[in-house]
Image (cartoon, rainbow, N blue to C red):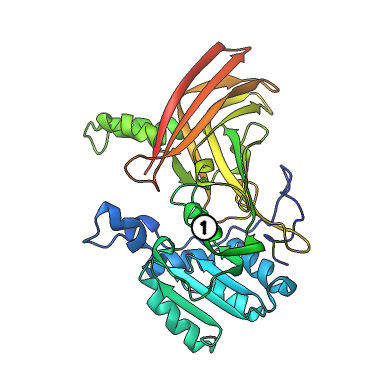
Amino acid sequence: GDAAASLAAPPAEGEVMGTSRGETVGNVSGVVPTEATAKDYYFDSYAHFGIHEEMIKDSVRTNAYRDSILKNKHLFENKVVLDVGCGTGILSMFAAQAGATHVYGVDCSGIIHSAKQIVRDNKLDDRVTLIHGKVEDLELPVDKVDIIISEWMGYALFYESMLDTVLVARDRWLAPGGIVMPDKACLWMAGAADPSFKTDKIDFWGDVYGFDMSCVKKSARVEPVVECVRPELVCTKPFVLKNVDIATCTKEDLSFEAPYRLQATRNDYLTSFVLYFDVGFTQCDPPIWMTTGPRAQYTHWRQTVFHMHDELVVSAKEVVSGKVSCRPNQRNHRDLDFTISFSHKGRVNGQKQGTHDFKMR
């Protein structure tokens, strides 16, 4: 069966949702059009097929959406659906297959021109209308929609996320009693012991083919890394940092400060904090949850890792606690500024505390 999409509740720690590592396709960093300005980067990069190929080949992601739609036709029959950030139109076409009266897909990237042809080629253009533009500037041909579907999640849930756009669409067009899919999101945090992080990521700059580039270390330290964290590196119990109810949350909820408490599961050197997320389609019967944690099947979101400047020597059952704050960057609201404070009273290295700032760009 589909490993991703059948749990009725967020997976418990240690519950493995499939073991085969999926394909990693394309390299998101290589797709910026040559003439793009920083401002255009987000929108233009999504016009490139490599990104959409990676997302569609992410079977955990695509199966979770497919199952939430096609195995829940009772939600879609005779309903009007809005797909926010429709990309290639795959979710819009699933919704049409599930019996929606009409589906409107909106995307501001150039991929929509290909998507329109895809819809025609699959003979769904009588029920699927794709519109090129920004949700914020649009007039839809209808006053209200019954369902909003969107794959809006970014790295660490909120980076380059389209949640603010989904909320605009929800407030403008969702009919009373209408549903948003997914309707729940949960941001998790854990501690990891990565023995190679300092050598690979920081000290590397001291000798690059014989040149001293150590001035880069400071910048390297403040950038979180999106990578697959091997489950055996996780050395604390996971902690729920933030729950998001997409039916009711507001744009202000995208900036938050949340306390955390991580309990060590063994004696180790805690070097890094790891963020990952689950999203839930809880209107489905049974509810469907998709997870992106280290113990789950691979997704293109991987995990987001925040490396500390110095490791903490933790003993089993000791607690590292503090706060995580996350807010959109003043200059580019799709970029994120994180601050993580920590405090640990350890048997080995005594009381240690501090604060690190990180910038996701």
Q: Quadrant of the N terminus?
A: bottom right
Q: Please indicate whether residue 22 sits to the left or right of residue 356 in the image.
A: right
Residue depicted at 44% across the width and 26% down the height = 356
Closer-to-camera residue (84/239): 84
Compared with 354, 194 (above or below) is: below
Compared with 9, 349 (above or below) is: above
Number of numbered discs visible in the structure rendering: 1
> Which residue corresponds to mark 1?
166
Q: Please indicate whether residue 274 sits to the left or right of residue 335 in the image.
A: right
Compared with 2, 356 (above or below) is: above
Q: Amino acid at mark 1?
A: Val
Q: Position of residue 220 (x, y in %)?
A: 35, 35
Residue 22 falls in which quadrant of the image?
bottom right
Residue depicted at 52% across the width and 61% down the height = 172
Q: Please indicate whether residue 244 sits to the left or right of residue 256 in the image.
A: right
Q: Quadrant of the C terminus?
A: top left
Q: Position of residue 96 (x, y in %)?
A: 61, 79
Residue 35 falls in which quadrant of the image?
bottom left
Q: Secondary structure at mark 1?
A: helix
Closer-to-camera residue (348/158): 158
Closer-to-camera residue (78/298): 78
Q: Position of residue 28 (x, y in %)?
A: 39, 57
Q: Residues within 10 Å of mark 1 (few under 14, many from 20)?
A: many
Q: Position of residue 318 (x, y in %)?
A: 67, 20
